[in-house]
């Protein structure tokens, strides 16, 4: 069962708990996700099954999109609603235009400091474990990209916005930074991941829907490896090349177009359409090398 499942993760469970539940529903032994969602967050979580777990890196680098709700006037130690309030501002009446301009000011390449309450490690220990002991360490600023940020609604202290961003962006840190820039403090109150690359929340499945789904047929939220990687160009090889591909050896393709040379991955298939491997062009060798061999494994 080599599949990618677009799961709509519910609130208050970890991403790993969600993967464990998918494994039980599908009765498989091997599964993993392509990018963590915090327990308080809901939305799109891509879960790779069996051989698809070897391709997780192809999905984890995708840009993400979120629908976020921040609460103005309260900053917390975890930067989200699960944390302890560390500062409070009573009056948070801010003009809509100021909020819009503040959101827009974060668009583009920005530097972000990862939060202490995160799985990043310091000297081999997760930061959140240090944070729980009251220990704070220096965290290197990281460059992220906010591709789009759009105000959706304001209702009292709650501000709803949509954000499209690069891998590695902490939305709760973004909310904390927005609150600081507005001078009133803020924290992430609700979060839904609505897109991962080309995958959309509208095409995802709940646990109940997955339980009743037919995994043997193409359907909503269930992707074969080839379909999930449809953004990669496809290359069909003859029988002689098939043997080289399935043994992990590079192959030489004459007059290879730039579309293949510049692609982040190439779906290599047999003449009858079986997905054999994922390869990439090596300029040094002027050949297509095999990065992940799927056939016969």
Image: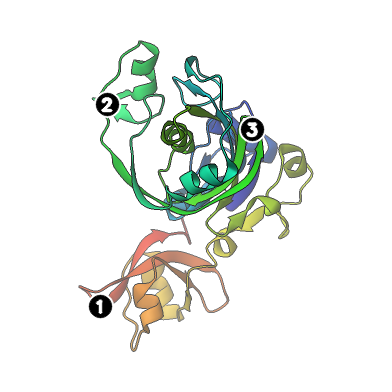
> Where residue 286 sits: x, y (%)?
25, 78
> Where residue 170 sits: x, y (%)?
44, 38
| Callout 2 crowding tier (Cα within 10 Å): few <14, some 14–19, many ≥20 | few
Give the structural element (helix, strand or loop) at label 1: loop
> Where residue 74 sits: x, y (%)?
52, 22
Which of the numbered marks, if any, corresponds to residue 122?
2
Q: Give the residue displayed 44% in from the left and 19% down from the top.
A: 77
Give the structural element (helix, strand or loop) at label 3: helix
Q: Which of 159 and 241 is in front in this view?
A: 159
Quote the CA–CA distance across marks 1 and 2. Answer: 41 Å
Outermost residue toward the top in this view: 133
Res 285 visible: yes
Q: Determine which residue is flagged by label 1.
A: 286
Give the structural element (helix, strand or loop) at label 2: strand
Q: Give the residue displayed 52% in from the left and 63% down from the top.
A: 229
As drawn, 238 above or below 97: below
Q: Which mark's residue is nearer the viewer, 2 or 3?
A: 2
| Callout 3 crowding tier (Cα within 10 Å): few <14, some 14–19, many ≥20 | few
Res 49 visible: no
* Circle nearer the N terminus (2, 3): 3
Q: Give the residue displayed 52% in from the left and 57% down from the top.
A: 197
Q: Nearer the viewer, residue 247 or 170?
A: 170
Q: Determine which residue is flagged by label 3.
A: 21
Quote the CA–CA distance across marks 2 and 3. Answer: 30 Å
């Amino acid at each position: 069962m080599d599949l990618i499942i677009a799961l709509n993760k519910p609130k208050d469970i970890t991403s790993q708990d969600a993967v464990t539940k998918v494994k039980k529903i599908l009765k498989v032994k091997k599964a993993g996700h392509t990018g963590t969602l915090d327990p308080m967050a809901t939305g799109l979580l891509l879960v790779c099954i069996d051989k698809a777990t070897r391709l997780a890196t192809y999905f984890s680098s995708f840009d993400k999109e979120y629908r976020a709700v921040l609460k103005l006037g309260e900053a917390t130690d975890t930067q989200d609603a699960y944390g302890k309030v560390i500062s409070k501002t009573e009056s948070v009446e801010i003009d809509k235009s100021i909020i819009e301009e503040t959101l827009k000011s974060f668009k583009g390449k920005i530097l972000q400091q990862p939060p202490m309450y995160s799985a990043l490690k310091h000297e081999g220990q997760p930061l959140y474990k240090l944070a729980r002991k009251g220990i704070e360490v220096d965290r290197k600023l990281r460059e992220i990209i906010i591709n789009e940020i759009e105000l959706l609604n304001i209702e009292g202290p709650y501000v709803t916005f949509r954000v499209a961003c690069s891998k590695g962006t902490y939305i709760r840190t973004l909310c904390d930074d927005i609150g600081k820039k507005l001078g009133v403090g803020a924290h992430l109150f609700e979060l839904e991941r609505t897109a991962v690359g080309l995958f959309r929340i509208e095409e995802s499945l709940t646990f109940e829907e997955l339980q009743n789904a037919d995994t043997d047929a193409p359907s909503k939220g269930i992707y074969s490896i080839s379909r999930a990687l449809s953004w990669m160009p496809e290359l069909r090889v003859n029988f002689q090349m098939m043997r080289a591909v399935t043994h992990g050896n590079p192959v030489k393709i004459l007059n290879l177009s730039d579309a293949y040379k510049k692609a982040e991955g190439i779906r290599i298939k047999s003449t009858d359409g079986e997905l054999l491997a994922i390869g990439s062009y090596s300029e040094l060798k002027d050949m297509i090398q095999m990065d992940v061999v799927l056939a016969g494994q």
